[in-house]
Amino acid sequence: MKKHFITGLLIWIPLAITAWVLVSIIGTMDRSLLLLPETLHPANWLGFNIPGLGTLLTLLAILLTGVIATNIIGQRMVRYWESILARIPVVKSIYYSVKQISDTVFSGTGDAFRKVLLVRFPHPQAWSIAFQTGAPANAVVHAGGDELVSVFIPTAPSPLNGFVFFVKKQDTIELDMSVDEALKYIVSMGVVAPSPAQTGGALPEHDKS
């Protein structure tokens, strides 16, 4: 009986969590309908709500924004809007910081969150999975005196939280593992391990024995 009950849990728990996440995302995106005039709300002219309609509206708005921003007029509008934000002290700092991060992560250029590494953390006898986020600032490089890389070490089971460190490049191991596989490994707290073909990597010279 216990075995069958656990088997049922293993089937229903992933389904329930997946459904909860999807419902939460769709419910949040559906709130975009509140931006429309009240007379255009589906509940007013259909008599009932249509789940997911706001999600489609949000995705369409994102797509149209991308189409507009890729032409000359759209680019001028974006520059004009950014010039207005640049005049607001606090907003300027937040906007350009977030923009720089999003441009780096989603543009597909650079090394940010493209490499999965092993680094020594939280003590010299332990290894942790980390993501290379790029090259450190010049001030950090000059102070460190060695070839450093900046890494983000996520915490389990939430990879959104973690630590940023600067470590010697020679003390890292680059894994033959995709970012998606590494995130699954972290979220599952080490339960869902990547396939053996995706766990390659050479130990630093001073760690070979």
Image: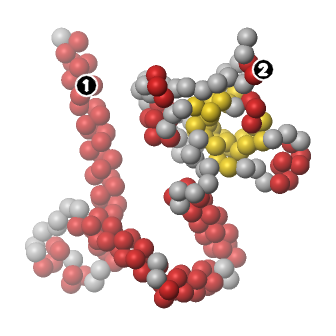
The secondary structure type at the circle numbered 1 is helix
Q: Is residue 168 visible?
A: yes
Instruction: Using the numbered discs, state the Cα–Cα distance from disc 1 to disc 2 in whole angstroms.
Output: 46 Å
The secondary structure type at the circle numbered 2 is helix
Going by the image, does 191 lie left or right of 45?
A: right
Give the answer, above or below, for where 129 lies relative to 57: above
Give the answer, above or below, for where 166 lies relative to 121: below
**Which amino acid, mark 2?**
His
Q: Quadrant of residue 36?
A: bottom left
Q: Quadrant of residue 132?
A: top right
Residue at x 67%, y 42% (from the top left corner): 151
Residue at x 54%, y 87% (from the top left corner): 76
Where is residue 81 drawn, in percent x and y? 56, 83
Where is residue 105 drawn, in percent x and y? 55, 55
Of residue 129 and residue 198, the one placed in the foreground of this image is 198
Name the residue tied to disc 2: 206
Q: Tell me if mark 1 has few (under 14), some (14-19) or many (20+) residues whose alpha carbon lies within 10 angstroms of its own.
A: few
Q: Tell me if mark 2 has few (under 14), some (14-19) or many (20+) residues whose alpha carbon lies within 10 angstroms of its own.
A: few
Quadrant (top left, top right, bottom left, bottom right) of the N terminus:
top left
> Is label 1 in contact with label 2 (beta carbons under 8 Å)?
no
Give the answer, above or below, for where 180 lies relative to 203: below
Quadrant (top left, top right, bottom left, bottom right) of the C terminus:
top right
Name the residue tied to disc 1: 9
Residue at x 63%, y 84% (from the top left corner): 83
Where is residue 101 drawn, in percent x and y? 60, 59
Q: Quadrant of residue 42?
A: bottom left
**Which amino acid, mark 1?**
Leu
Going by the image, does 145 lie left or right of 189?
A: right
Residue 105 is labelled as none
